[in-house]
Structure formats: C-alpha cells, structure tokens
Image (cartoon, helix red, strand yellow):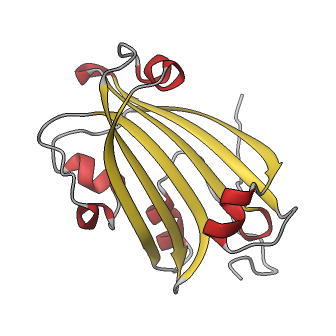
Amino acid sequence: MFLSHEKQHYTMVRSFTKEMEELGKKAETLSATVKLIEASKRVSKQLNIPEGSEVLQLRRIRGTVGHPFAYFITHIPYIEKFSLDNEDYYGSFYDYLRSFGIVVSESKEYVEATIATEELQKILKVPEYTPILKRVRMTFQSERNFHEFSECYYIGNQYRYYVEMNG
C-alpha cells in the first residue's frame, strides 16, 4: 500500500519517478515494451504530426517493490536516435529524453475517474470494478516542437494528486 494515514501531496507536473523519490520510495518499471506504430488520427492530433507518421509507442507497468499500480501508454514522434530496445526504457522517461537534449517545458493534463477494463485488470492485477484514476498528459518543448502524449492509469486507492492553485 502506498498511501499512509498522514497527508501526502503530489503535483501534476512531476514525473512518476520524482513523485516516488519525494515519498522516499524507489519507483520501478516492472515491464517496458516499445514499438514503432503509425499515428492514428487521435495520436497525430495530440502530437501535432500528420496521420500515419512514425510514432514511438511505449507501454510501461510501474510500481514500487515489485507491486504494479500504474500503467502508462506514451506516444512520441519517432526520431532515429531513439532506441527500440525495451531495456532502454526502464528508467525515468524524462531523464531518457534529457539525454537527447529534450527538456519538457510545458504540460497540459486532465484527470478522470474510471473503472478497470479487462486489460487493466490483467496488467495491474486488480479485480473487476476496481476504481482507476486516468491521467492524460500532453507535454511540449516549444523551442524544438517536441510533443508527448501519455495515458496513465493508476489503481484508485493507491494514488492521488494534490493540486494547489494560486490566484
């Protein structure tokens, strides 16, 4: 269990790895699968590229101490310097991008509640009707026109966000 009785705060702009570090926990990638796909209409719109363009799709199961509680599906425009070896995606994705000089400067997200689909039940090892927190993230690096589109699924009782708004 990743939530304690004391109040824990999360921010929406930090990576999963950084959030876990802030809590004194080591984030693990339990599984990573990368492949090239053609951008669907939906993905191409989010990445601001033509439909059918080559896209790197990364599917990762994340957790701590061998226990999965998050599943990420990430799409980025494919660049030949990006690896197609699954092993290269077990660390922080944003650190991986940084190694190519790509630093995300903007993020737009939305969060919604849903229940575990049959696929998520298998991946996250949860029973039917388990509450799931779905986060959709679009990140940008404006000076290099880089975009990322991620759909992230968290087991509902094991993850939460704290959002602070000033104004």
Q: Looking at the picture, how far across and down is residue 154, in whole percent?
A: 67, 60
**Image position of 115 (left or right of 159):** right
Residue 74 drawn above or below residue 105 = below
Residue drawn at the location 54% of the way across and 22% of the way down: 42
- Quarter of the N terminus within the rendering: bottom right
- Determine the residue positioned at 64% across, 54% down: 153
Pick the residue in front: 62 or 129: 129
- Which quarter shows the C terminus? top right
The vertical placement of 3 against 128, above or below, is below
Q: Quadrant of residue 122?
A: bottom right
Quick one: which residue is furthest to the top in this view? Answer: 50
Q: Is residue 124 left or right of residue 137?
A: right
Q: Which residue is rendered at x = 74% and y = 53% of the image?
A: 133
Q: Position of residue 158 (x, y in %)?
A: 73, 70
> Closer to the camera, 68 or 125?
125
Residue that protrudes farthest toward the bottom in the picture: 65
- As displayed, is residue 79 above or below residue 50? below
Q: Position of residue 64 (x, y in %)?
A: 53, 79
- What's the residue at 51%, 68% (across, down)? 62
Number of residue marks: 0
**Is residue 159 in view?**
no
Q: For residue 28, what is the image quadrant?
A: bottom left
- The one nearer the camera, 117 or 69, is 117
Q: Is residue 8 visible?
A: yes
99 or 152: which is nearer to us? 152
Q: Position of residue 11 (x, y in %)?
A: 60, 52
Question: On the picture, is 115 further left or further right than 125?
Answer: right
| Farthest-out residue, left | 81
